[in-house]
Image: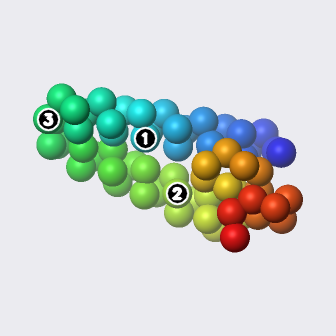
């Protein structure tokens, strides 16, 4: 897996974890900001064939 894919997956995971914390804390503004960040990261992953859940890129049997 490329360094790009590894870094992108790490950023997605970080954003998901922070989003969960902010939802739990009830911080609606942070939830909106983090949701937008996560959407952008997922879009980038999709455009580059990166499995957003950490299973490799699509060409290596990752996300369909």
Q: Is residue 12 left or right of residue 61?
A: left
Residue at image location 64% in from the left, 67% down from the top: 47
Q: Which residue bears the numbered disc 2?
A: 42
Residue at image location 43% in from the left, 40% down from the top: 16
Q: Is residue 39 left or right of residue 52?
A: left
The quadrant in which the N terminus is found is: top right
- Judged from the image, the secondary structure of the residue bearing numbered disc 1 is helix
- Is residue 48 visible in this depiction of the protein? no
Marks 2/3: CA–CA distance: 23 Å
Name, please, the residue furthest toward the bottom: 64
Residue at image location 22% in from the left, 32% down from the top: 24
Marks 3/1: CA–CA distance: 15 Å
The location of residue 53, given as percent across then percent down, is 61, 49
The location of residue 39, given as percent across then percent down, is 43, 57
Q: Is residue 25 above or below residue 61?
A: above
- Is residue 47 visible in this depiction of the protein? yes
- Judged from the image, the secondary structure of the residue bearing numbered disc 3 is loop
Q: Is residue 7 above or below residue 50?
A: above
Say whether disc 2 or disc 3 marks the residue closer to the N-terminus. 3
The quadrant in which the C terminus is found is: bottom right
Q: Is residue 45 above or below residue 24?
A: below
Q: Quadrant of residue 26?
A: top left
Q: How is the image coloured?
A: rainbow
The location of residue 55, given as percent across then percent down, is 72, 49
Q: Which residue bears the numbered disc 3?
A: 26
Instruction: Kindly check if marks 3 and 1 are in contact, taking CB atoms under 8 A apart as contact.
Output: no
Say whether disc 2 or disc 1 marks the residue closer to the N-terminus. 1
Q: Which residue bears the numbered disc 1?
A: 16
Marks 2/1: CA–CA distance: 11 Å
The location of residue 2, given as percent across then percent down, is 82, 45
């Amino acid at each position: 897996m490329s360094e790009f894919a590894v870094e992108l997956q790490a950023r997605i995971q970080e954003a998901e974890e922070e989003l969960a914390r902010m939802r739990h804390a009830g911080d609606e503004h942070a939830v909106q900001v983090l949701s937008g960040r996560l959407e952008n990261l997922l879009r980038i992953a999709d455009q580059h064939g990166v499995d957003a859940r950490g299973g490799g890129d699509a060409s290596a049997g990752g996300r369909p």
